[in-house]
Amino acid sequence: MEILDILLSTILLRPYVFVLLGLYLVAGSLQLGLKRIVAFTILAYFIAFISEYTSTRIGIPYGLYHYTGETHGKELFISNVPFMDSLSYSFLGYFSYSLALLIVSPVTRKGWRFELSHPPWYSKKVLFLSAILFVLQDVLIDPVSLRGSKWFLGQIYYYPVEGIYFGVTLSNFLGWFLVGLVIIYSFQKLDNKMGWTREFAGNALMGPVLYFLNMVFILSVTFYINEYLIGMISLSIFSGLIILTILKVRRALSISAKSLKPIHI
């Protein structure tokens, strides 16, 4: 009963994380397939947990930080790390990977569905772009999470030495970039070795849409707690990404419209 109580308490404490997790599993299953998304989730969780475990002890790779223990007894912990924190890397990693694939791949339209034609699953371009998109999420997430006492998250962690980016250390962002690289690279290698590759990737927009929906949620919290400068900086970053994504989708719509035009003889 105690385990069930902790699980229920975890859901009630972080309902938004469970909503994102559910949407991620649906989107990932439709785009990558069930086997691949399960493998991605497991890989991302263990890599994230190791990175958080070592950072809270020796400061690698994010720099030294500590969980306050404020939510002990209210949510599930693995050692000193909240389970949901590490698990969230799976959907944040997938959102980034899916958006990177959309940006670099040919996009085709079939009715209301957008598909990626011959996506470069294992390319270095996708790898590094995914890692960049991954860390860009944290440019917004970490400063807002650090101010958890101002909203329902609570003050769950802190840096012993305050960082220069709204309290967040620059080493934290370097760590996110490296961890993003490791997650995507590990998945690419496993995916290639297991032969799970698909020639086409359906539902190409679901992952990118969830990437931006998550950012909209965090931005709304940012402005709600009156952190306007953080919000404006983040909004400028993600506005550029949204415009790039819209242009890519419009191009696919344009190509589709041209192919449907009747040929007059």
Image (spheres, rainbow, N blue to C red):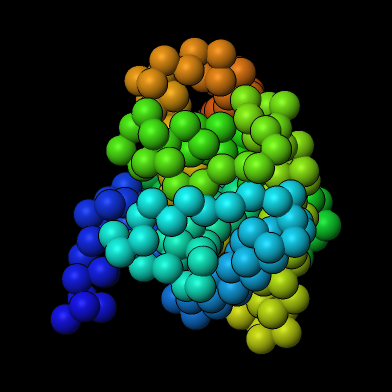
Q: Position of residue 83 (x, y in %)?
A: 44, 66
Q: Where is residue 66 in the image (x, y as percent from the top left)?
A: 58, 52
Identify the image quadrant of the C terminus.
top right
* Residue reaching furthest to the left: 1
* Left or right relative to 124: residue 51: left
Question: Is residue 196 visible in this depiction of the protein?
Answer: yes
222 vs 33: above or below: above
Q: How many labels does the image show?
A: 0
245 vs 43: above or below: above
Q: Which of 176 and 10 is in front in this view?
A: 10
137 vs 114: above or below: above
Q: Nearer the viewer, residue 160 or 101?
A: 160
The residue located at (51%, 47%) in the rendering is 157
* Residue reaching furthest to the right: 124
Image quadrant where residue 149 sits: top left
The residue located at (30%, 38%) in the rendering is 152
Identify the image quadrant of the N terminus.
bottom left
Q: Position of residue 140 (x, y in %)?
A: 56, 32
Q: Nearer the viewer, residue 185 or 157?
A: 157
Q: Which of 174 and 97 is in front in this view?
A: 174
The residue located at (68%, 27%) in the rendering is 165
Question: Is residue 254 visible in this depiction of the protein?
Answer: no
Q: Where is residue 13 in the image (x, y as percent from the top left)?
A: 28, 52
